[in-house]
Structure formats: structure tokens, C-alpha cells
Amino acid sequence: MAQIRNPRLLKALRRALELAKKLTVLEQQTVQALRVEADKIIGVETEQGLIAAKRVIVTAGAWSAHLLNSVATPLAVNPVRGQMILFVTPPNLVSRIVLAKDRYVIPRRDGSVLVGSTVEPAGFDKSTTNTAREDLKSAAFKLIPRLADYTVQKHWAGLRPSSPNGVPYIGKHPNIEGLYMNTGHFRNGIVLGLASARLLADIVLERVPILEPSDYALTAERGENATIEQCRNEP
Ligand SMILES: Cc1cc2nc3c(=O)[nH]c(=O)nc-3n(C[C@H](O)[C@H](O)[C@H](O)COP(=O)(O)OP(=O)(O)OC[C@H]3O[C@@H](n4cnc5c(N)ncnc54)[C@H](O)[C@@H]3O)c2cc1C
């Protein structure tokens, strides 16, 4: 089993985009709305005005439904908060990743130890709570008693983009020409990110797809929405 530090992954992606040269990256610009005319996408509205585009891909994580719902059938992507804590310990105090039911302990080479994570419906509230902190601490102490000698150095929260049964939406919009989505990856957006991006690129460029895309279509049958309780019990 391996681990990836997502801020570093994003930094690498940012650098790859710079090296690609043909791309323009616009940062810190909120897309306020999608612009659609006669069932075709014509661009996105930002604080700086309209950015015209024949193709638009919605990858706004837990916020994707906000963007899509104004122009199309409501999308079942909702925020599910996850909180984590981090201990700083001497290197090798914990020597391997430990998974136990709904909790995990992940040691890093520098001695820091991550403990996660909660699965909570909290709307778009990204704040941390004392209840979660204590809950994660007590799970950590049960799994690795020596962690009780160290204090929590960091505590943070993020919003996962949930979808029915955690099956992401990857593909073109059935009714709006030029509109695509790649969202709803719930607990596995890092793990599934590369393959999802590749699949969507294949669809947009009309190449032979790396895998059968129909299961991820907006209109695909996804079964019942997984409950928070079921999500907690994922291995
Ligand atoms: C505590 C925790 C632990 C996790 N652990 C794992 C794990 O071990 N493995 C794993 O694979 N996944 C894990 N995940 C899930 C993973 O983080 C998500 O599935 C993934 O981040 C989803 O990627 P995304 O790009 O779709 O959405 P996000 O990462 O949420 O990115 C969406 C981006 O869109 C931006 N945005 C939103 N609206 C707009 C707008 N209107 N205009 C412009 N920008 C906008 C947001 O600011 C954000 O930067 C974890 C999540 C949490 C919270």
C-alpha cells in the first residue's frame, strides 16, 4: 500500500501544465454560471466577464451541482465533510499504514502521523469540530497507544463530492452540446483521478476510450444513494 500527498500531486500537475505551454491557467476566478444558448454551451461567466468556449468540463467537486443545476436536470452530487488530524512524532514510531474499520493511521517518513477520517453530512461547512478531534484521537490511541504521548499539531476538514453509490459522473451532458462533467468521486477522487481524466479526454476527443464509459454517464443507473452509515463502514 502506498500514499500520496495531494498538495504535492497538485503542485506537480501545476508544473506539468506550465510545461505544456499551449495552456492558459486562470486561477482564483470563480465561475458564477454556465452560459448555454439553444442547448449549446457558449462559455462560462466569471467576475471578469464571459469566457467563451465551445466545450466546458465541470470539475467543481462538491460544488458541481450548483453549477449544473442552473442549466440542467439536478445532479446528485452533495458535500460530505471529512476531518483529519496530524500528530508529530519521532520517525518510525509508527512503521506502517493501519486500517481498522472506518479509521486509518498513516505514518510519513518525517515522523508525522495522519489519522482519519470522519464522514459527515454538514452542508458546505468546512470547519473542524472538537467532537471529531476527540473521536479521531481516541481511535488513534486504541490503534497505536504510544500516540497518546504526543499532541495533535494539525486538524483540518475537506468536502468530498458524494454521488449515488460513489460512482462518478464522467462524460458528456445528454442535452447540452459541448458540456461535459468529471465529478462525484466521493472518497476516491485521488485514486480515480488519473483514469477519470484519461477517460474524459478520450470522450471529448472522440478517441477509443480506455474503458467502457456507459457506467459513468449522467443517465446511468446508479442504484440507491449510499447512506452515510454505509460509507463509514467502507474498508
Ligand atoms: C478527509 C478526506 C480524506 C480523503 N481521502 C482520500 C483518499 O485516501 N483517497 C482518495 O482517492 N480520495 C480521498 N478523498 C477524496 C478526494 O479528496 C476527493 O474525491 C477529490 O478531492 C475530488 O476531486 P475533485 O477535483 O472532483 O474536487 P475538489 O478536490 O473538491 O476540487 C474542486 C475544485 O473546484 C473549485 N470550485 C468549486 N466551485 C467552483 C467555481 N464555481 N468556480 C471555480 N472553481 C470552483 C473548488 O474550489 C476546488 O478547488 C478524501 C477526502 C477527504 C475530505
Image (cartoon, rainbow, N blue to C red):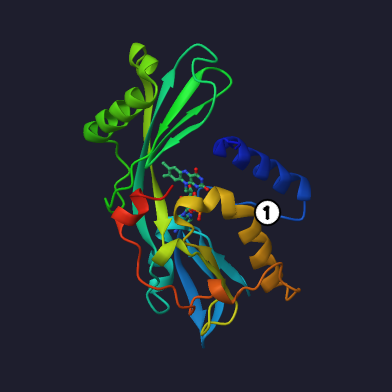
Q: Tell me the quarter of the picture where residue 192 sits.
A: bottom right
Secondary structure of the residue carrying numbered label 1: loop
The image shows residue 86, relative to residue 33, as above or below, that is: above
Residue 228, located in which quarter of the rendered image?
Answer: bottom left
Residue under the point 56% across and 39% down: 6
The single residue placed furthest to the bottom in the displayed view is: 38
Q: Nearer the viewer, residue 60 or 120?
A: 120
Where residue 195 appears, x then y in whole percent?
A: 65, 58
Q: Which residue is mark 1?
A: 24
Q: Residue at x 45, y 51 (%)?
A: 187
What residue is rendered at 67% in x and 69% in y? 211
Q: Which residue is at the front of the view, 145 or 30?
A: 145
Residue 196 visible, this orientation? yes
Specify few, some or many for label 1: CA neighbours under 10 Å numbering under 14, 14-19, or 20 or more: few
Task: Pinpoint residue 198: horizontal percent, then vertical percent.
Answer: 68, 61
Q: At 28% across and 30% down in the image, what residue appears?
A: 133
Type of amino acid at the residue the image marks with label 1: Thr
Please, is residue 157 above or below residue 80 in the view?
Answer: above
Count all numbered tags in the image, as a single digit.
1
Residue 147, image x, y percentages: 38, 17
